[in-house]
Amino acid sequence: MSTFLIIWLVASIIALAATIIMQAERRVVELVLILSLAAFATWVSLPNNPGLYIDINGDGVGEIDRDVEIRQGLDLAGGVQVLLETDLDEGQALPDGALDEARRIIESRIDALGALEPVVQVRGERRIIVELPGYEDPESAVELIQQTALLEFVDFGPAANSLPLLPGTPVETNFEGRPDSEIEDIAEEEPLVPAIEAETVFTGDIIQNADIGFDPTTNEPVVEFSLTPEGRQLFGDYTAANVGQPLGIVLDGILLSAPTISTAITEGQGVITGQFTVDDATQLATQLRYGSLPIPLRVDSTSTIGPTLGQISIEQSIVAGVIGIIVVMAFMLIYYRLPGLAATLALLIFAVINLAIYKLVPVTLTLPAITGFLISVGTAVDGNILIFERLKEELRAGKRIGPAVRAGFDRAWASIRDSNLSTIIICFVLWSFGTTFGAGAVRGFAVTLALGLAINLFTAVIVTRTFLHFLLLPVPEKTIDEQPWLFGLTKKAA
């Protein structure tokens, strides 16, 4: 755990304990919590943040161990864009739902790559577009997207024990699901190694889950898998009937390994070895876990979007955001005076809480997402304006400052709540639309706007009211006749 986080937690606990012991007012407790939250959010928002590390058990393994940084989308960070097209004969019809199923599988594989906010969407009747923000290796991305990862468990027949079953040996099977050209391609790549004929017993369809593991003896990467209930029964029956025989594990026509069956395997779990690197094992596990593509796809185009445009966009967005916030703060201070000061402080806390959540969730920032944040700043100010106008009405009606502040917040709350919640509902509709149709820009806009609106319900009411309470402590029982300048009023109350 970082030193700053420890200090913050200890200080917060001490402050809260002292508050309770002294039986302080509820506003003091609120102020302590608000300032503590603001301090933590500011720390998270700082550039080059060291990240969060919390070791609860004290065993040296952090239960919480993660980087805290801004994730940028394709338009800001650059990345890879791949356009795929179905590779079918002219006039051949697509099976119903095949393109959507291919999109789902590709999206699952891309998620395993660690790409930030990947966009995988269907374009037209035969195309799929894939966008990988922050990804710098287009070749491996294309390979993972296209590869079908045909895994076969094969039987080499009676002469199995006399065959040279070495990893990397081409294997020709009777499985009809493999394209005819695949063995020819293998032969071209490995011309000095003759292919071994074998009979396919099972395919990767019997695998329910797969993940990377490490051999406890050699510490080499392996792929651990578990079987479906049906696959467990088939695997158990086959291994029981073939004890002492090798079982070949073949990936895309290449022998990975051929372990000898020493006993019946009925637990429904197994390990694939094959002199993998960590990346190879991870990729194979991903392909087995998410299945093969239902239709062949070819790459129509691949483009790498550089970070230069992204950097320019970031700088322009930051400048626009800073200018906008400064103008809003200046307006609030000039027009509303003391309440405007409270709103300005609340707006600063609103901004750092938003940024902290973007880092912690994390939220991928794109230009539409930044637009959503800037609009949420406007809604935050709208809430304060509504409150302060109601406050002025109460003051003009002759109420003292303290009761007028309470009445202004209480009567404006319902309008602020209803307007923000209705917009959040619209954001949910936009997010659903973006998720269903692969419109990542719409989804990013909806997420940041909804977060801003939710945070505004806290900052515009609770934070602003708490700050205003302490700013007005010297004058709670005065009337607007005595202090008109505090609220930007020039006329005395009637």
Image: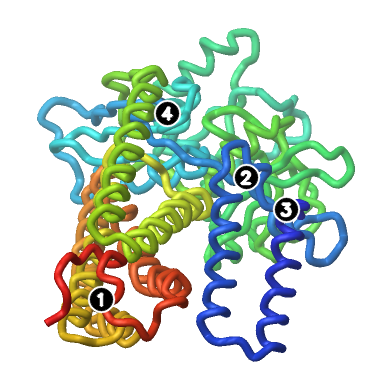
Cβ–Cβ below 8 Å for labels 1 and 4?
A: no
Which numbered disc covers residue 417? 1
- Judged from the image, the secondary structure of the residue bearing numbered disc 2 is loop
Identify the residue at horizontal 66%, vertical 82% (top origin).
19
Q: Earlier in the sequence, mark 1 or mark 2?
A: 2
Q: Tell me the mark number nearer the camera, choosing from 2 and 3.
A: 3
Per the image, the residue denoted by label 2 is 67
* Residue nearest the observer in this picture, 324 or 489: 489
Secondary structure under badge 1? helix
Q: Amino acid at mark 3?
A: Phe
Whether residue 339 is situated above or below residue 465 in the rendered picture: above
Is there a contact, CB below 8 Å, between mark 1 and mark 3? no
Question: Does the image show residue 205?
Answer: no
Q: CA distance from mark 3 to mark 4?
A: 30 Å
Counting from the top left corner in percent of width and height, residue 228 is at: 54, 63
Q: In this view of the protein, which residue sits in the foreground, 380 or 78? A: 380
**Earlier residue among tags 1 and 3:** 3
Residue that extends furthest to the bottom in the rendered view of this protein = 23
| Labels 2 & 4 near each other (Cβ < 8 A) | no
